[in-house]
Image (cartoon, rainbow, N blue to C red):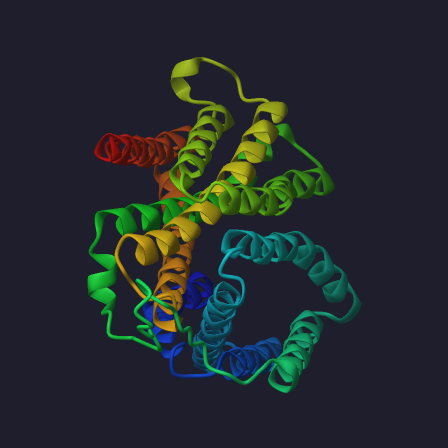
Amino acid sequence: MIYSFIFGVYELVMLLTSFIFGKLVSRIAPNIMCGFGLAITGFSTIAFGLLDHTPNGLLFIIPAFVLRITESLGATAFAISSYSFITYKFPEKTATMFSLMELCFGMGLIIAPVVGAVLYEMGGYSLPFGVLGFMLTISASTILIFLEPKTINTTENLDNNNIEIVNRSDTSILKFLLNPIIILDALVIITALSLIGFNSATLEPHLRDFKLKPLMTGIIFVTIGLTYAITAPIWGKLCDIFNHNLSIFSIFGSFLCAFGLILIGPLPYLKVDKKIWLIVVSLVCFGIGTAAKQCSGYSHALNFSIKNRGLPKESSTYGLVSGMFFACISLGGFIGPTIGGFFLENYNYETATVFMLAIEVFILLSLIISFLSKKMTVR
């Protein structure tokens, strides 16, 4: 249990600090925040790999908690600054650039376990952490040296009156969040990550009845990450082209996730035996659906904040949206495995999928109602 808390504290710290770093984006140059965030993460990763040489007990637990907290702070800093920076540099292609970042995230989910396993076989526990930490510090140095050291400011012309908007960061976090549309976008992102987390915590026990070889189990696990990585850029491009109807992509993504949850159990009421091909089809639906929800949720929150709520097209807004995005990622990453673990321990996998399906159906219906209400208002 203590090891679960050590790894879970990462998500908790990111959840608690995402908006803080989101506000700091308007005051700290992106190369500084991103570079030092990567460096802190890199050094923390290297140090975490050395914990294998510490004795059991408090001499292991306390440094482990401290390093995970430090690592999370660094990761939050570089993640939020990088997403805010690409939004600033590519204002007309926000969804496309966002999806390319998500492509890299998906590829990391695929590559990291394989490379980590190889390095572990070669040099034991410390080597994977050492190699990753070294790569992070090299990346930090590159960013600090070559990325333009300039704060994210934007000057716009409003109503041809030459009114300048520069670094207006007076929008409070609470005021930003307390909006029904932003809350719905946040729920779209949360449920996407909670489904991924739920799957990572419960899929392996669900596959045990098939008595698969470890390699085959690993290939099935990769399905969702691979599908996510392949389709994220497509969704990003579509979100940029059809940026006035982003809710449609969220609706479609939520529908695919719900459809996957019906098949993967399968749903008890279907009276269908579970089969490998049904599980693979479900994971493909999850990958496509979560990619659609992530891209459209982030893009819609940003577009709605600027076009409908009058927030400035500058760092304070980019930071708030990026902060919301990573807070939702952390919350979803915590909720999914927690729900999966609870239902798997106290009930069964099929019951767990029914609960997750109920949440997804609620989000789907909310999105449809919101979309139809907007269409009726326009008419």
Instruction: Tell me the quarter of the picture where residue 255 sits.
Output: top left
Q: Residue at x 33, y 69 (%)?
A: 19
Task: Between residue 51 and residue 8, name the one nearer to us.
Answer: 8
Q: Position of residue 178 (x, y in %)?
A: 20, 56
Task: Determine whether, in the image, residue 326 is placed left or right of residue 85.
Answer: left
Does 170 appear above or below 293? Answer: below
In this view, the residue in front, 278 or 164, is 164
Q: Examine the image and state in which quarter residue 288 appears.
A: top right
Q: Residue furthest right?
A: 122
Farthest-out residue, front: 160
* Residue at 51% in and 76% down: 56
User: Residue 238, percent across and down?
Assistant: 54, 41
Query: Looking at the figure, which quarter contains the C terminus?
Result: top left
Task: Give the percent coordinates (x, y) of residue 286.
Answer: 52, 37
Q: Position of residue 262 (x, y in %)?
A: 44, 25
Observer-nearest of 247 and 133: 247
User: Which residue is found at the position 49% from the left and 29% from the top?
Assistant: 260
Q: How many tags in the picture?
A: 0
Vertical placement of residue 155 versus 178, above or below: below
Quadrant containing the N terminus is bottom left
Whether residue 17 appears in this view of the structure is yes
Query: Between residues 257 and 124, which one lies in front from this camera angle?
Result: 257
Q: Residue furthest top?
A: 271
Would residue 337 be seen by someone viewing this image from the given angle?
no
> Residue at 60% of width from left, 85% of height from top?
144
140 relative position to 176: left or right: right
The quarter of the picture where residue 302 lies is: bottom left
